[in-house]
Image (spheres, rainbow, N blue to C red):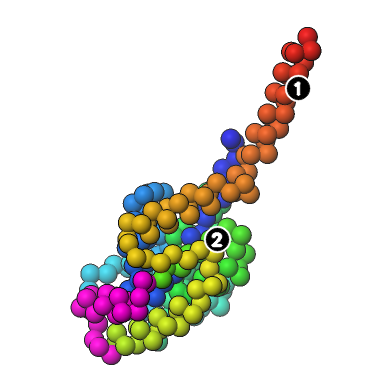
Amino acid sequence: MGDARRGLLIILSSPSGAGKSTLARRLMEWDAGIAFSVSTTTRPPRPGEVDGREYHFRDRPTFEAMVARGEMLEHAEVFGNLYGSPKGPVEAAVEAGRDTLFDIDWQGGQQIRNSTLARDSISIFILPPSIAELARRLEARGQDSAEVIARRMAQSRDEISHWAEYDYVLVNRSLDETAGRLIAIITAERLRRDRQPGLSGFVRGLNREFEEVRDDLGA
């Protein structure tokens, strides 16, 4: 129908262990055109992580200079490290009609919703089925000490307190069911009237056809 739509900023947030990363993967498997926003961070790379793939790894002075120049769409400090989303690639994707997925916390989501790209964003919060299950998932990872898990649980409580700020909230009882609902949300958001710029021209064409049919019937 003519004009291409603008790209979406898909904000996905949840407490650690609620399944956000797996759901993000499912979404990108469903549509390979959805690009993952690679964040910039001041934390050191973990074994196997590659600069530009998992994160853009930068030192604190470089990161702070990027913030000062207005190059970050959103940023926050988590456990002593800075994290942020570079603005340039996201703006280019929106203008080109490509969707970008953000795996960020409530602070980042709030900043995007208050930015110049707010109208292009949708926000989805993932809740765990229970706190006991959340703790079990964190422990099952086997990556963190008991102290780190306790700290993540405390952070999770704060994260969950912001659930009502999001457009959509999904309780992740079943991964398949939640992934299906997530895909349904993205599909519906893409079809919103104000995200189909070619519709007005299409309807004008329908009205011209009405005139042609009326003239034919009159003849």
Residue ID for mark 1: 211
Please state, as top left, top right, bottom left or bottom right, where the N terminus lies in the image: top right
Q: Secondary structure at mark 2?
A: strand
Height in image: 3 above or below 48? above
Mark 2 residue crowding within 10 angstroms, few (<14) / some (14–19) / many (20+): many
**Extreme residue in the right direction:** 218
Question: Foreground residue, 187 or 86?
Answer: 187
Choose mark 1 or mark 2, whichever is in front.
Answer: 1
- Residue 104 location in percent, x, y? 44, 71
Residue 195 lies, with reference to residue 133, above or below; the image says above
Answer whether residue 49 is magenta in the image.
no
Kindly identify which residue carries mark 2. Answer: 121
Q: Main secondary structure of the magenta part?
A: helix
Q: What segment carries the magenta color? A: 128-147
Whichever of callouts 1 and 2 sits on the residue coming sooner in the sequence is 2
Residue 162 in sight in this render: yes
Q: CA distance from mark 1 to mark 2?
A: 39 Å
